[in-house]
Image: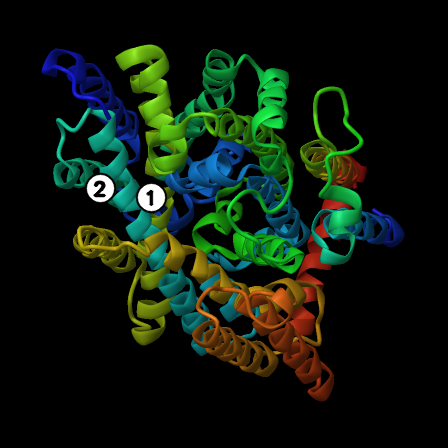
Amino acid sequence: MKGWVRTAFVIYFAVMLFILSAPWTFNLFINRLDPWVGPFPWSIFSVFLFTFMSCIGLAIYQTLDIQQ
Amino acid sequence: MREVSLGLAIIPTLVVLGYMAVLLWMNRRSYGVQEFNEFATANRAFGVWAITFSMMATWYVGASYTAWMGMAVNFGFVYTYTPVYGAFCLILLYLILDKMWIWGATHQLNTQGALWGLRYNSNKIKALAGVVGVIASFPWLIMEFWTIGYLLSHGTYGYLPFLWAMLIGAAIIAVYVALGGMRAVITAHFVQGLLFALGATVFTYILIYMNTGGFAATIRNAVANFPEILTYPGPGWNPPPQWWASIIITSSVGGFLWPWAMNRVFASDSVRTAKRATWQAITIGTLICVFFLFFGLSAHSLGYARENPQMVWLWLSDNLGGPVFLTLALLVAMSAVLSTTASLIHFFGASIAEDVLKPLNSKLDSRQATRLAQYVVFGVSVLAFFIANMELPMLIFVALLTYQFIIQLGPGQLLGMYWKRGNAVGAVAGMIAGLAVAFYLTYLHPEGISFGGWTPGVWGLVVNTIIYIGCGYALPVDKRTEELFQEVENYHRQHKLAAAGR
């Protein structure tokens, strides 16, 4: 795998973690009820959305990685 | 739990005892392990799904059904830190596991301490990393032993006393771990992990559906009656947002550093296996957390559940489906607790023999090391059994506190795998300084929230990282480290050539 692809994935994971946890963005991105997604409040929906996006990111990274 | 006749209580009792007997029987081919590599890593023999379920079975502790379930019931949204840290601790592990596996296979590494010893070229550092891992892990072993007693005793409506419940569970695990080593641990994990995953999703959904009518109905009920549970920090307390960030950082870094969890990589049959198992475990684990969170939100509507959050998993199962549901709930929870306990006591045996006793006695051969590891498994089990029987009201607090300290292995392990300039002086000085800062701030702020709303471990980690990087730039790169990194490049080059030739 090319070095820049690896770096891009590491940055992607760092951004996901920052959105999910950083106290400066937490109340802005995560900790609120609106907007509702179907019956689910944004708080719960967004945590699982970003966490699953991280899982999918790792799945893609892993696929590229083992094709090396 | 309610009082029932012996005729009803016998159902969960016999099923769980039968389950434990099956675990002993299915491991029969693993018994009689002689060589230390076989005991510690099963000679790196396991494939993708065995490692996937072993990772899950190890990471999801028995307390997921008591303490963490209680957190979901009482505080709701805060529980979602669990999938976040579960995912990111495995992502961190993924980022270093090719080097871990390659060095492990090349140099016959068995433990985290051995990895440190190789990377920093020092037996003293090997022993230090081993001892830090052992000390930080011991409260978890006590907590898991206690959880075995608690679950079994409540799950049998009190007919099996706490002491006997813990004794039976601990003895069975100690026997199959000591006799079968890593092969027995992972073979049992496959069944335990599968049962845990099915129970934590399908069975949990049935409970949610019967209690509040499904996911959407659970949310509607929460919005109508207790909306504060849907956002941070939940009812009854007010930690700052920095606390949320702190627990995610400490748990993510700490979660990938637990030596009894990361040594699954050494049991994988290839780098590819370890990598694929990691993302599979993350995805299934995150899914399980969705169900656990909704179970907590659903149970929050019941007064008894809010007052007895640790009991809610067994209590609600019994309430909704009687002894049959209670038996299923007990089987699922016991799978989680038995699997983690097996990983823990196996780690104590392997790590104390490899990281502490081998450097003290260089004449120790492979079979003698295995014998010592087996004695340690029994010794540690007996010690944890006695301590778990004492009055330990703050046990969960002590166990969570250990994250503040285990993360001090973080810079040495994570940066050390990528950065050649990372050296032994920086790793040890950073770790000691980080531990000192974490201890001192914990002493000043025993409630766990220190300067700026951050936890003591985070400040320790910051100091630790600065020292590690500073020492890296201050001292030259040693030749041995260059050779180690070259080994990894050579491995990849050889595999590329082999793939091109096929």
Q: Amino acid at mark 1?
A: Thr
What residue is pinned by disc 2? B170
Is residue B305 or residue B314 the one in the foreground? Answer: B305
Q: Residues within 10 Å of mark 2 (few under 14, many from 20)?
A: many
Above or below — where is B298 with respect to A4? above
Q: Are marks 1 and 2 in contact (CB under 8 Å)?
A: yes
- The chain carrying label 1 is B
Q: Which residue is mark 1?
A: B341
Q: CA distance from mark 1 to mark 2?
A: 8 Å
Name the spot of residue B218 as percent of width and height, x first. 57, 21
Image coords of residue B48 (percent x, y): 56, 32
Quadrant including the C terminus of chain B:
top right
Q: Is residue B488 above or below residue B181?
A: below
Residue type for callout 2: Ala
Say which residue appears at 22% left-offset and 39% top-offset.
B149
Do marks 1 and 2 both belong to one polypeptide chain? yes
Q: Secondary structure at mark 1?
A: helix
At 67% from the left edge and 70% from the top edge, which residue is drawn? Answer: B483
Circle 2 chain: B
At mark 2, the secondary structure is helix
Which residue sits furthest bottom? B474
Please tell me in which quadrant of the rendered image residue B336 appears.
Answer: top left
Say the numbered circle drawn on residue B502. none
Identify the image quadrant of the N terminus of chain B.
top left
B115 with respect to B348 (left or right): right
Whole-percent x, y for residue B79 in the image: 55, 40
